[in-house]
Amino acid sequence: MGSKVFDYNSIEKESLSCNLCGQDDFSVIAVRSKNDLPVRTVMCKNCSLIYINPRMTSEDYDKYYKYHYRQDRNSIKSSTYDTDLERNFSFALKFGHAMAETMGQFFTKGLTIDIGSSTGGVLHGLKEKLPDLDVLGVEPSIDESNFAQSKGVKTNNAIFEEWKNSEDIKEASNIICVQSLNHLLDPKGFIDWSYDNLKNEGHLFLAVKNFRHQVRRAGKISSGVQIDHPYMFTPESLRCMVESCGFEVRYIDVDEGKSLIELSKIKKRGFSVHHIRLVAVKKRREGESGLKCSGLYRKERSNFYPITVKLYYLLKYSKKLEILRKILHIK
Ligand SMILES: [Zn+2]
């Protein structure tokens, strides 16, 4: 892949086994991406994890993020990429405050690592509300990590996959990953790493986009597919991954199904809506820790037929109905 032109079609792809359960049996649920690239999205028939398969190699993803990410993202969002670091920081700061207010009870004092910490706003916001935290960010973008440092948030400028092998962390009290899990090429590797580096009773905090909510709102599966999200999660598949790695879920807040009023309150508080917020605690593994997704595929598969997605959209999210519901005062 050259540094000037990004031609997704000509880049060689690799086939992958399921990141969670390791099996190779899947259903195809979409064949295009939101910006109309030929991207195949599959659902594992064993554990129901949704992922892009085949996909670019990690070397090509590196180049993509370095040279083409902004341009490609602009074509998805049809707006300019948010390069305003101050703005990014102030949104994230509010997010950190909201996290402390709603999940503060789960934080314990000590080392608190944010993977994909961007401008450091989340950590800064948390530290303001919970001063006992010893915060550390890990962020691949040079501009964003420099900005975080300038705000006093200690940040290592590195790609997580390389950083995790070079640092001997152990004994973290809290590990956070806010809206970055979708971007990781090995999300289970991240959850396993979190388990290995948290102290007993330490907590993992995740904020992840809900793929099911996203496609239902759009009425189309491909609308939720973008190449910088190699893995996609539903509340159930996220819980399954976390539990399969040895955690116990202590808190899960899902925006799907909430009323417009509730959603606007969540937004006002500082969270991004259409997400899943999950807190899990590390428990000592007792006996076998196997896959915790039994029977999930059958339930999840039916949610991802084009017709089911369309029906959901027509019944719950289409604009016409939105207006009608308002007139009839039906929430
Ligand atoms: Zn699987």
Image (cartoon, rainbow, N blue to C red):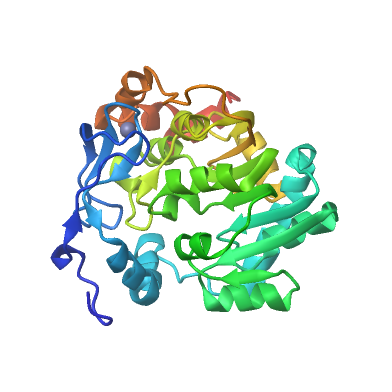
Q: Is residue 277 above or below residue 152?
A: above
Q: Position of residue 117 (x, y in %)?
A: 60, 62
Position of the C terminus, as image quadrant, is top right
For ligand 1, which image quadrant applies? top left
Residue at the extreme bottom of the image, as rendered: 4
Q: Nearer the viewer, residue 28 or 74?
A: 28
Q: Nearer the viewer, residue 169 or 179?
A: 169
Q: Position of residue 185 (x, y in %)?
A: 38, 54
Residue drawn at point x = 44 percent, y = 47 percent = 189
Q: Position of residue 325 (x, y in %)?
A: 53, 28
Position of the N terminus, as image quadrant, is bottom left
The tally of labels here is 0
Q: Look at the image and tell me whether residue 191 can be seen.
A: yes
Residue drawn at point x = 52 percent, y = 59 percent = 164
Residue 229 left/right relative to 165: left
Q: Position of residue 129 (x, y in %)?
A: 84, 53
Residue drawn at point x = 45 percent, y = 36 percent = 213
Q: Nearer the viewer, residue 70 or 219?
A: 70
The quadrant where residue 68 appears: bottom left
The quadrant where residue 312 appears: top left
Q: Is residue 168 above or below residue 235?
A: below
The quadrant where residue 18 appears: top left
Residue 204 left/right relative to 243: right
Residue 119 left/right relative to 27: right
Q: Is residue 259 above or below residue 67?
A: above
Q: Look at the image and tell me whether residue 84 can be seen.
A: no
